[in-house]
Amino acid sequence: MSHTVAVDRWVLSSGASSFTSTSNFYFPTKFTRSPHFGGNIIRASATTSGSNESVICKSLLCGRRALLSLATLSLVMPCDRVNNSFAADESFRLREEIRKVLSKGKAAGVLRLVFHDAGTFQVDEKIGGMNGSIVFELDRPENKGLKKSIKILEKAKSQIGVVQPVSWADIIALAGAEAVSLCGGPSIPIKLGRIDSLVPDPEGKLPEESLDATSLKQCFERKGFSTQELVALSGAHTLGSKGFGNPVVFDNAYFKILMEKPWLSSAGMTSMVGLPSDRALVEDDECVRWISKYAEDQSLFFEDFKNAYTKLVDTGATWKKSL
């Protein structure tokens, strides 16, 4: 006698038994639904020689087996595999919403937002870092203009928040990576799960634009970054209106132009290229070694920037505990 219950949607299996159902099944929030976990689909129909009651009983029995399978699913699929799958799905949705509101013309401002949120970190004081506190600090002089970038990302945050709450720290970190990628830079993987601060970070922790190379290196050292990482991160100034090549293309033009020192020329606007801190780097022998390497090898710059950016947005962050 063959029995079939109409099947669709999903399959669960435990040992030799399998169950399928036409109903949509919604897993807990942090669980990624998979179309098939293994096992063969059993088909049956009420139009067989058995009684309707018998078919219903067998269907209910299958349902009980499915619930048992679901209860023991964590034994079949490792927890880290489930969590990684969910994290990848969440990251994809976030990136998708960010791409809807981001453009090449807005990329430099969004990337600056990352540096101003994460750049407050101090190793010895254990304060600051990528914690979303920038939303409380927008009226500070050093953060002038960043309200526009926050407004750009607010829409993406509200859209994804309907499905899954997300912190400002995660949104900003991911948006900066998307800004780089959108403008032709490296693809940067971003870990999610940062928790937002409920208060602003202390003032006076960001590097000042007027610092010389020695002071810059000391400042970044207090934040846990090497001279090489300082130079690599400074390459973000290739985006925007600071005079380093195409303002919407992420490449190694920043380093090439630093090596040329156009501000020493008497040809008008070339004296306006870069910030004082940019020009200071090329006067330091240790910094110049890295500047020349990145000017000659864009792939090396991309790789080192990716690693330094990841460190920047992870350092000082407070993370959600894994389930």
Image (cartoon, rainbow, N blue to C red):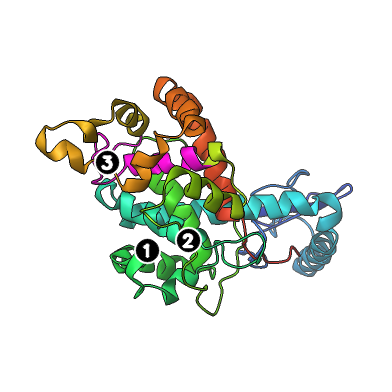
Task: Provide residue 15's location: percent of width, then percent of height.
Answer: 89, 48
Q: Quadrant of the C terminus?
A: bottom right
Mark drawn on residue 171: 2
Residue at left offset 85%, top offset 63%: 68
Structural distance between the alpha carbons of marks 2 and 1: 7 Å
Q: Is residue 116 visible?
A: yes
| Amino acid type, mark 3 | Val
Residue at left offset 32%, top offset 70%: 141
Numbered disc 3: secondary structure: loop
Mark drawn on residue 153: 1
Callout 2: 10 Å neighbours few (<14), some, many (20+)? many
Residue at left offset 37%, top offset 63%: 153
Mark nearer the viewer, 1 or 3: 3
Residue at left offset 76%, top offset 68%: 56
| Amino acid type, mark 1 | Leu
Task: Provide residue 31's location: percent of width, then percent of height.
Answer: 67, 60
